[in-house]
Amino acid sequence: MIVAEQKPLEEISKSLEGFENIVIAACGTCVTVCMAGGEKEALKLASVLELNRAEQAVPVKVKVVTPKRQCDVEFLDDMAEEFGGADVILSMGCGAGVQFMAERFRGKLVLPGINTKFIGVAREIGVWTEMCQGCGACILEKTGGVCPVARCSKSNFNGPCGGSMDGKCEIDPNVDCGWQLIYDRLKELDRVEKLYEIVEPKDWRSSRDGGPRSVEKKEMRLDTDI
């Protein structure tokens, strides 16, 4: 899931200065789960913005809408009428959602209400950790299901850097050494011999180094003969 945090109220308020008709677009998926941009957070933000404007005697009308996903065209099209009278749209979706909203509603200014952090998992209530950087060429089969790109602070591919101590990374004693995790997992699986398989230098063209990426499944396209 995409993990994000809401932007500081001061930053949001400043970006909305001068606008009277504001639509806050929550999102019903990832940012709802990490409690950053779901309907609950959007309604709370709307109340705060209205209260602040009232204290300043500045007119404002704030409406909250919640598409199921902001990264899916069918859900955005269903919400098109909701954005009709808006001066500005404050998207509580991830960075992809903000950009897709801006692309679909070109006549509207779309502003971000959250900061997108990483692809991660929920460890416990209120705690999320990064697990994947979306490098485009997964090698988890070689590392016991522990990603060296995301979990090793230096993204080493062939063993630890030598700076760890007691299983913790040298950058922070609270951060697990990614390669300690890999070793422990492979040992549990009786597959430690995988550590002797040298991983060739990574072709980073499958990552962000090759520019914006896309995935196409031709069998799912309506305009393609199968």
Image: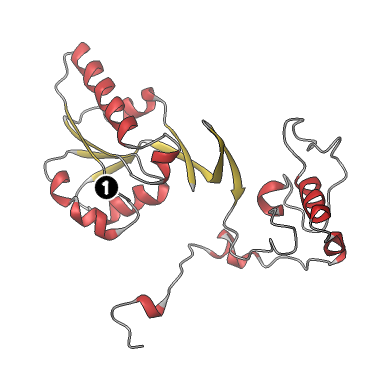
Q: How many marks?
A: 1
Colouring convention used in this rendered image of the protein: secondary structure
Q: Residue at x 74, y 32 (%)?
A: 172
Q: Residue at x 36, y 44 (%)?
A: 93
* Residue projecting furthest to the bottom: 225
* Residue projecting furthest to the top: 55
* Numbered disc 1: secondary structure: loop
Q: Residue at x 15, y 45 (%)?
A: 82
Q: Position of residue 177 (x, y in %)?
A: 77, 42
The image quarter containing residue 199 is bottom right
Q: Quadrant of the C terminus?
A: bottom left
Q: Position of residue 95 (x, y in %)?
A: 41, 47
Horizontal placement of 44 versus 139: left or right?
A: left
Q: Residue at x 40, y 51 (%)?
A: 96
Mark 1: give few (<14), some (14-19) or many (20+) Cα within 10 Å.
Answer: many
Horizontal placement of 144 versus 8: left or right?
A: right
The image quarter containing residue 63 is top left
Q: Which residue is mark 1?
A: 67
Q: Position of residue 35 (x, y in %)?
A: 42, 34
Q: Position of residue 109 (x, y in %)?
A: 25, 44
Horizontal placement of 102 versus 211: left or right?
A: left
Tell me the amino acid under the disc marked 1.
Pro
